[in-house]
Structure formats: structure tokens, C-alpha cells
Image (spheres, rainbow, N blue to C red):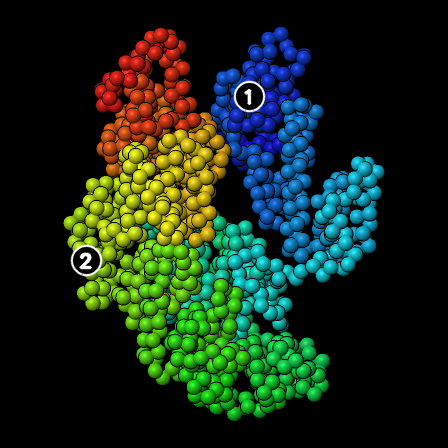
Amino acid sequence: MIAVLFGVLGPLAVTTDAGEPVVVPGVKVRQLLADLLANRNQVVSADRLIDDMWGEDAPADPGAALQVRVSQLRKALNDAEPGGRDLIESRPPGYLLRTGAVDADRFAELADSTDADRLAAALALWRGDAYADVADEEFARAERTRLAEQRLAVQERLAEARLARGEHDLVAADLAELVTRHPLREGLRALQLRALYATGRQSEALDSYADLRDRLAEELGLDPGPELVALHRRILEHDAGLAAPPRAAIVRNSLPAQLDELVGRAEALTELRRLIPAQRLVTLIGPGGVGKTRLATEAARAQAFPDGVHLVELAPLPAGAAHVADQVLATMDLREAAGASVSAVDRLTAAVAGRRLLLVLDNCEHVIEPAAALVARLLRDAPELRVLATSREPLGLTGELLWEVPPLAVPADGDLDAVRRSAAARLFAVRAAAQQRSFRLDASTAPAVAQLCRRLDGLPLALELAATRVRALGVQGVVDRLDDRFQLLTSQQRDMPPRQRTLTAVIGWSWDLLDEADRAVLAGLAVFRDGCTPEAAEQVCRTDLDTLARLVDRSLVVLDETGPGPRYRLLESVAAFCLERLADADEVRARHAAYYTDLAEHADPQLRGVGQQQWLGRLDAETANLRAALAHGGGLRLANALTWYWFLRGRLTEARQALTSPGDAVQQSRAAAWRIGFALLQGEAIVPDEVRAALAGDADGRATWFTANAVLDRSDVALASELLSMAADDRWTEAAVLSSRAKLAHAAGDLPALETAASRSAALFAELGDRWGRLQANDWVGGLAEMRGEHARAVALHREGLRWAEELSLWPEVCSKLSWLAWLAVQTGDHALGRELAERAYRLAVEQGMPSAVVFAETSLGMAARRAGRLDVAAAHLGRIAEQGRREQPTFYLPMILVELGHVAEQGGDRAAALALHIEAYDAAEAIASPRDAVFALEGMASAAGSPEVAARLLGAAAAARTAAEAPASPVERDDTDRVAGRLLALLGPERFEALVAEGTALSPGQARAQL
């Protein structure tokens, strides 16, 4: 790639990639370059350039004069970088400067963000007013105005972002000059008023408002807008919402909401907030209960990473489990897709490569080896990634910064002032007051609080558990009960770390306060992973809500109400303590497995009806429990019940592994039928006899349809058709089979069959209330509309499907719908929209690891690039897809891709290569029995045929085939045929051309192909 960089955000500047300035000689040559840059990547006519450069004072031979300036500019660029002259292309009716290395484009890229750092970087590109040295030229005026407005808008957004980060004083200072330069811009004034008020400068804020009000009245005869008036009123009323928020309360990521104040960690937070962006890996280490998770969460909350902050809770994983990458993928909502056979680590690495994000890996100690291996891989392959880990031991990686989380500072004595300065005492006092409103940290309680804090070593969890007993025992009573317990555990548990001994003692003391029945319930709750619903707790632990409420009151069980329904959770240390004391572990685990097996079996039919979204969410919340149930008795019965859920959530590997579990003959037969479908979706070779044998035990036909659909995705039409005919005909399976038949009809261009199958499938799925099914049918109803030329209806259908997919978090379907919409945009000539939608689909497909979706999205990218004249970009996209299609033949998409590549070659001047590609496309269309694709290939052959007479006949044959197939050409397809027809008319004359086209209409596609 030619490395010449252009700057227009200030005086015109040209540099090499190494930063060396490029001399552009002469005022007129610089003016020419500025004009081409203002219209970069599009043809500027010679007449317009002449008018822009000379106006009414044009030289005697303006065309020659312009050509001289173009030559001088090309020479200057070529002298700077070999090949630089090629940046200026001669394209009728003028010239084109092709470049993507303009500071204004980089500015626009950075400006498309709400992140303060990116916005600041965007503004740093400016060296003065845009196009400063051609400021008076008419051709630059609109571009200068546009860029100036964008600059001001970014300055406003940056101020907004900095206010959100709490930088009110700095923003107030920076806005003073901007407001002076733009005194009537209300958005700037509003930001200034907020900044001034939040920094305690209320009178200045009111003065600024009064200044604006007076100016508007005097200069424009207007009043301030309603939003500014409302802001003025809030300032007068001292609205608390205008006060500067603490940095830790600003949430710009997916971290859980802050439920209470973090006490005693101000200095630690300040240091960690500085370290996290500067270090690749920071690991918080310390004993259980010291507050690593809470500190990490609050430190991460203040970070501003463009691609987000994700808290990954590893506690639900079993000890030594290798599924750390799966847990991260689930947290980031990255799904495994059909056709992918990539490991979780590779999928995660691909998803985060090049992204600027922070991963918070919490509780690594029980999975230390796989966690360390994953982090090492991610840090190596994703240079913009930052990792904040919590663990009881280091990960042991190069470059790891260990940050030991200390206990909270304890008071040296009982002096009231010293106690109040102690972080441990402040935490205890806040939590105790929450339990007993009358509690006060005063001279009477300070000595006991000081003693308690010292005896508990300042461990936050121990302090919080102790605070729950103040209401019943008083602070001195709590201290008195700790004495013997701590002494006992310290003397007899010498193999445990000192701080863990203390934490264990606190939990043990709380355990002893329970009666036997409550202890049994608390121990039973420890078998749950990632919490449980009240119903699950009641059934598995054989308890009631009153008992659960008592355990919540004693802070041994946490009631989490942040999700759609309440869940009970145990703190990690409490759960570990309780598991060791679970007397009937096998019995409780059996009840746990039975409960979740019943839940999955009840959910399975709901996932195919009106309750689909609700039950997807419920099973999502129970993922960790379902995995635990599989490992402790759920077996093949549970695995069979989860097959459809796993498919909808893209967990193909997990499904295949679970379906190998032991079970009875009926369960194994059912599992084998589903297992073959999952294997095919992951790219396993299709062996028809093995497929038929595996499906022999399919009782309800759904696994047969599922496998047929997987076969169809691999373009094996014969086997897919055979299997579809074997599927049973309950209403849901009938609808699914019809959707697959619609796909077959779409590929074959059989419009009557497509309409029948797609419409009936859509109607059945709508009656059932299955929105996933409606999405599948919607693809082909929309495809039918597109084939008939009803593009507006097709767009409406796919937009509706996109909304459904997003609501269900079905990311493969979201990607499919974006690709359909991109395709339609390209077909109707809106190439910019097509490229935008295709890029979104492509990013999502790569992130989610969906090869088929990548093909669909990249197809639209290639087609949009060709129609925008970017033939090299089109060739790169389409060439990759063609090579993949050739390897995997037969594939439905290959003929169309080859036709597009043929047009790229023809428009690039290589008609021989183009003709070979179109002939290959025709043969590929014949192989998959797709008459519509054969039509495309015939039209392509016409564009590349050496004989005008043959080309005209080919156009006639293609037109006749289109009519027979009821497949009218889209606007962009007409553009191609019109281009070819125009050339042939010029060569043959209207009469001869029409006669040859008429001859062609009598030819079959095969006969037309034989013309070459």
C-alpha cells in the first residue's frame, strides 16, 4: 500500500509514512490537491477543476494547463513514495484521488464514539482551521463548514464525556474560550452551566445564562430553548442531580450495579485506577474474605475502555475445570455457531483481538492453571486487552503485576478519634448501623469496636458478618463470643493461612448460632452454582421461605434481586465452609439433579412456543446449575432435554459432549439422533449411511429435521431432501420442514414452491408463537419478495426479523438479518448503506465464529465495493469466498460469487478471465440445479463474450430465462445488463442488436451456453 498521508485539518500537509514532509510545488498544484482531497475517492470532472482553480481567468488552453498541474502533483507524490503517482487516477470525465489516509477520515473514525480518550485523540489531529490555505476558495467552503461543525460537535461530546467522568473543573476551564467564540450555541452553554454549577460556581453559571439570554434577545429576538430554561431552573433550585457524581459511581460497562458504599479503600482505588490502564495484567491477591472481588469491581467501574469492561465470575466453575474460556464467552454473550469447529480459546482470542477492553477474571484460584494459560494466550494475541484478576495465588505469568489486597487498617487503641480514622472500624460501624439504627460509634462503643476490629484482622467479610449480630448481642457481646472460638481455631488449624483461620472462625461462629434445621438448609444451598430461585431452594433443601428469610437476615445468604426474579446466593467462603459440613451430600445432589432435569424437560416444549423468550432467559440464568446437575446424576435424560436450548444458544460442543453421557437404551437412541446433527453443524464429514443409522431411533422426527437442516447447510440437496421426507408431521416439525423446503426452493429459483412452503411455515410458526421459527420462515418470505422485485416489502420483513432476533439475543439470526438487509441495500443501489450493514454483520459473524454468516456478509461487502468502483477491494472479498466455495463444492453461493468476480475482471479489462469465471459460474449453477444463478451467468457471459453477435444472443436468452423463472432483475442487475446492452448497441446498431436479442430469446440456457 502506498504510504502517503494527507492532512487537511489545518494548512494542507502531505507526509510519508515515516513522517517526512512532501513538498507540493506551486500554489495551483496545492490548490488542485486540496480540491481532489475535498472530493477524495470520487471523480472530479476536468471542467469543475478548471473552474475551481481559475474561474473566469482560465488560461488559453485550460485542459492542457490542468494536465500540467496533475503531472506535477503526480511527480511530487512519486518522488516521496515510489508508486505515489498512482494515487491520482485519470477517470472520465476527470481525475480521482484514491486514498484512505486523510486526517479528516481518521478524525471521523475517532469521533464516532462517546469515549473521552478517543474524542480527545480526534481533536488532537487538528492543526488549525480545516483547509486553512484555501480558505477563500469556493470548492472548499462546504467541506470547511462541515468539518468545523463536526469539530465543534466533538468538542461538545468530549465535554459531555468528561463531565460524566467527573472532570467538571477542567471542563469549565476549557469551555470558557469555546463559549466566547460561539456565544449563541446553546449546547455549549448548557455544558458550561453544568460544569460551573458542579464545581461550586453557581453565580458564574447564572451569569453565563443571563449573558446568553440577553444576546439571544438583542441579536436574534429569541428566548433560550426549553432545555436550557429547565437547566436554569434546576440550578436555581439546587437540584442534587446536577452535583458532580463520584467517579466510582459512574457505570459505563457491564459490571453489576453498586448496591452499597465501598468503605476504607479510597487509596487502593486511586492506585488501581492508575495501574489498570497502564499494565497488561494486574492480579489482586489475598486471603478469602479480604475484599478482592469488591475492590476489583469498583476499580474496574471507573475505567473507560472503548469496547467495555466485563466481569467474569469463575466461582461457578468446578475446581480444576478447563472451561474458563467458555465462561468468558458466556459472560461476553459470544455464541458458538453452526459450521464452526473452533475451540473456545480460539474463538475468544479471535473475538477480543484488536479490541480495547478490560476483562475482570474473578476467583481464579480454583482454576489457576487453565486461567493462567488462557490469560497468557489472550495477552499474547490481543495487544489492546487488559486483564484484572483476583486470586488467592499469583497466575505466575511474565509481566504480571501482583497487588496484594491488605486487610483494612485497624485502630491501635480505643481512642475515639483513632477508631474513627480506622477503615475497619468505619466499615463495621456503617454495617452495624444498617442492622440496628440506634448504633453509634461513640466513646462508649469505641473500645469494643477497636478490639473487635483487631481480633478480626480487619477482614471485611468477617467484619460484615459480625455486624449482623450487633442487634442481638451488642458490640461487646460480639467481642465476648469471639474470644474462645478464635483461640481454638488458631491453635488447632495451623496448616491454614492465618487470615483464613480467622475467616473460618467467623463463619463457624455464625454456623453455631443456627439450629440444626437451619444448618441443614444452609449446607444444602451450597450445592447450587451461581445461586438459585426460591422454588429451587425449597425443593432441593426441603425448606420453606421463612427459613430462607432467617438466613438472609443473618447475612449468610444473599438475596439477589438484580435479575428478572429473586435468587439466593452464598458468599464463596460460606459455600465452601458449608460443603464440608454437608452430611447427606449424595442425597442433596440427587435432588438437585432431579430438580434441574424436571426444569429442563418442562422448558423444552416452551422453547418452541409463546414462552420462548422467558424460558431462554430462565435457562440462561441456570446454566451453572444445569452443568452441575449433568455432572451429578442428570445424565443423558437431562442432556436430551437441553438439546434445543443448546442449539438456540450456539453451544454445540457442550451439546455433543453431554450427549455422550451414559443412559438407558431409549435415551441413547434419542441422543444419537441429535448428536449426529450437532456433529454435522460443526463440520464433520457427511456419511449418509451413518446419518441414516443415527436417525433410526428418532421418535418424534425433530432430530431428523434438525439433521436434514444441517445437511442442507452443507448443500447436500439429495440427502437433505430424503431426510426431510422422513420427518414426522406434528405442527412444529411440519413448520420447520417447510422452512427447510423453502430454502431449497429459493436455491432452485422455484418461486411457486418457495411461496407455498415459506408462507405455510410462517403461518404455522406464528400460530405456535415460536419467534425463532418465525425468523426462519421470515428469511424465505423475504427472499421470495426480493426475487419478485418487491424490495421494499423484503426490507420491511427482514427489519421485523432483526427486531425479533435482537429481542431473543439470537446472535446468529441477528447476523443473518443484517446480511439480508445489506444484500437488499446493494441490490437497490444504496451501496453506502449496504457496506455499513455488511460491515456490522461481518464483525458480528467473526466475533461469534459463524463461517456461513461471514460468507453472506462478505458477499455484500464485495458487491458493494464493485459497484462503488473499488475493484481491488471487491476482488479481495469475493476471491476469498470463491476459494472456500470451490473447496466445499457444491455450495449454493458459489455461482453468484463467480459471476461477481467475472464482472470485476471484465470491468478491470481482463475479458478472457471474466469469461472463464462466468462459464465456471454457469456450470456451478447447473450442478446445484439453480436456474436463477444460470441466468446471472448468461448475463455475465454476455458482458465478456468476444463476439458482439454472441453477446446479444446471450442477453436475449437470459431475458427469456428470467421471464420463465419469474425473476425480474434488481436495479443493480439492470445496471450491468444496461451497460452491456449499451456497448452492443453502439457496435451493432439498434436494428441488428434487436434482431440478435430476439434470436436469443428462442434459445434455452443450455443452447445459449453452447454459443461460446
Q: Nearer the viewer, residue 504 or 2?
A: 504
**Horizontal relation, residue 578 to residue 476: left or right:** left
Q: CA distance from mark 1 to mark 2?
A: 68 Å
Q: Would you say residue 149 is visible in this rendering?
A: yes
Tell me where residue 776 appears, x and y as whole percent.
Answer: 36, 46
Label number found at residue 44: 1
Dot 2, crowdedness within 10 Å: few (<14), some or many (≥20)? Answer: many
Q: Would you say residue 336 is visible in this rendering?
A: no
Of tags 1 and 2, the one toward the viewer is 2
Q: What residue do we see at 62% from left, 72% from top?
A: 264
Residue type at mark 1? Answer: Val
- The residue to which callout 2 is attached is 697
- Proximity of marks 1 and 2: CB atoms separated by less than 8 Å: no
Q: What residue do we see at 58% from left, 15% from top?
A: 47
Q: Is residue 457 above or below residue 391?
A: below
Tell me where residue 474 appears, x and y as whole percent.
Answer: 62, 88
**Horizontal relation, residue 178 to residue 811: left or right:** right
Q: Is residue 68 above or below residue 382?
A: above
Tell me where residue 284 appears, x and y as whole percent.
Answer: 51, 67
**Horizontal relation, residue 455 to residue 952: left or right:** right
| Mark with earlier residue (1, 2) | 1
Label 1 secondary element = strand
Label number found at residue 444: none
Label 2 secondary element = helix
Tell me where residue 774 appears, x and y as whole percent.
Answer: 38, 47
Quadrant of the snapshot with the C terminus: top left
